[in-house]
Image (cartoon, rainbow, N blue to C red):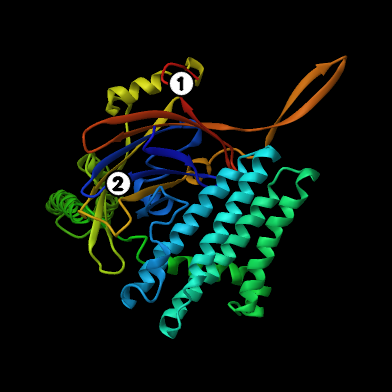
Amino acid sequence: MNKIKLTQDENLSIKVGYQLLPSDHQRLDLYFSLPDEMGISAKTLTEEQYFHHSIQNHSAYYSDQLHVPLVRSRFISQKKGEQSDYRLNLNLYSYQIRTALDTDIKQTIKLKEGKDFYPQAIELAEQISGLLKKLRRYTPSDQKLRAYFENADNYLSWQVEQSFLKLLSRAPKSTEYTSERNFLFALCRRENEYRAENQYNSQVTLADPNRITNKMRLLQRLIEYGVVFQKNTKNLNSYLNRIVKGTVTAIIMAFVMVLVLNARTNFTEVTIALVGMLGVIYGLREIFKEDITRIIWRRIQKGLPKWKIIYSHSVNKSKVANQTIWLEYIGSKDLPPQVDKLFQTRRQQNKQAAQLLHFRSDTRVNAKSFLPGYDEIQQRIYFNLTPFIRFLRKGEGRLYALENNKITKQAVERRYQINVVLMHTNKQKQQQIQRFKITLNRSNIINIEAIEVRNGD
């Protein structure tokens, strides 16, 4: 799948990312097959709970030219362009550097051989040093603009140091690359000394890991201003839900009043029996009202979109895109034929009884053009899988074996498997479809494997 990717994000979360063009319209469907042993259903984990607590949507300007920021150094020169545009251009440049750095660090960490790892790391260090020099070449003299510059410069310097320290901590262990390691260590020390010389952070902040980390997170959000879109989430069915609740309550009350009037005609006086009967009637009303309302509501909203997210530019507040979202438990009969076919390619022993959770997202881009240098926006959706494994059993098992009349045992962890089918439809109605097998335990995702259509697993 070239245009859309499903990858691991953190220990127990995955992300789906794809790009959108001006005036574009794309649809994304994800079908989660959750084994019954996980204990997940509409009763234990409602769609609303999972959406609000475990699904995050992110949309921002995007460029695949990661090593050559499209917002060139001339755009962050105070002498060129309007001063009112300085912060936006500075943020675009800084955001692009951070994106490039994050991408390349992750790719370099995957290299396990020193002969591949260290040349790549040195090249990355030289590239990032050049980008920082371009940024610092245009330090504004205007105090109003200097605050924006110092925030971005402080964050990028810290992020570069942290990224390369992380890179070195996972580097292949070898004495053959001492000079390369020293070169990378020098970059980290240089950035640390640079921040100290400019007094970007107080000693009190530096002495507390939590304070310095939280400060940098704040600076990160500041450089996203104008680049990452603001979002406003709306519940599409709130009024319909109120109407359903009101209608059900009215019908039940009418039925209760009929019972009360009949009871009253059978008892000419207020007696203990009458009071007891009225108590039973009102008690039954409270017992069944919620259940009846829930059953009727689930039938009515089946197949209806539940939320709408409106993305707007944080500077001029113009609407950039809107995203309509569906999320519901479905039956196997509701699966599209091509999705059902992929689920059926599993080997017989892997076909467990499972709950099916369907996520759908329709994204439509309203903007006919983007900022100069950017031809696409990137849509990313994060799914936290923690709610799926909260009912799973803890601990490890033991595997016993007989070797030369001696019994050996090995600790083995409990692993579980979630099957996910991703279906992506673009503006021209062209579809890409892929099944993924996610293996996880209670702590983290072990593996995400894209399954070939022709093979079972």
Sort mark 2 into few (<14), some (14-19) or many (20+) by Cα contacts within 10 Å. Answer: many
How far across and down, in percent of the image, does residue 300 sit?
20, 42
Helix, strand or loop at label 2? It is strand
* Displayed quadrant of residue 209: bottom right
Residue 351's disc is 1
The answer to whether one can see residue 70 in this image is yes
Q: Nearer the viewer, residue 190 or 327?
A: 190
Q: Residue at x 56, y 46 (%)?
A: 106
Which sits earlier in the primary sequence, circle 1 or circle 2?
2
Is 4 drawn above or below residue 146 in the view shown?
above
Q: Nearer the viewer, residue 178 or 332?
A: 178
Structural distance between the alpha carbons of marks 1 and 2: 36 Å
Is 107 drawn above or below residue 70 in the view shown?
above
* Displayed quadrant of residue 393: top right
How far across and down, in percent of the image, does residue 157 sit?
57, 66
Helix, strand or loop at label 1? It is loop
Q: Nearer the viewer, residue 46 or 50?
A: 50
Residue 244's disc is none
Q: Residue at x 65, y 76 (%)?
A: 196
Is 7 drawn above or below residue 275 in the view shown?
above
Q: Left or right? Give the position of 108 relative to 435.
A: right
The amino acid on which the numbered mark 2 sits, given as a three-letter code, is Leu
Sort mark 1 into few (<14), some (14-19) or many (20+) by Cα contacts within 10 Å. Answer: few
The answer to whether one can see residue 277 in this image is no
Q: Residue furthest right?
A: 405
Q: How many marks?
A: 2
Q: Residue at x 22, y 53 (%)?
A: 236
- Reading the image, the residue beneath label 2 is 20
Q: Nearer the viewer, mark 1 or mark 2?
A: 2
How far across and down, in percent of the image, does residue 453 sit?
41, 20
How far across and down, in percent of the image, does residue 382 sit?
43, 48
The amino acid on which the numbered mark 1 sits, given as a three-letter code, is Lys
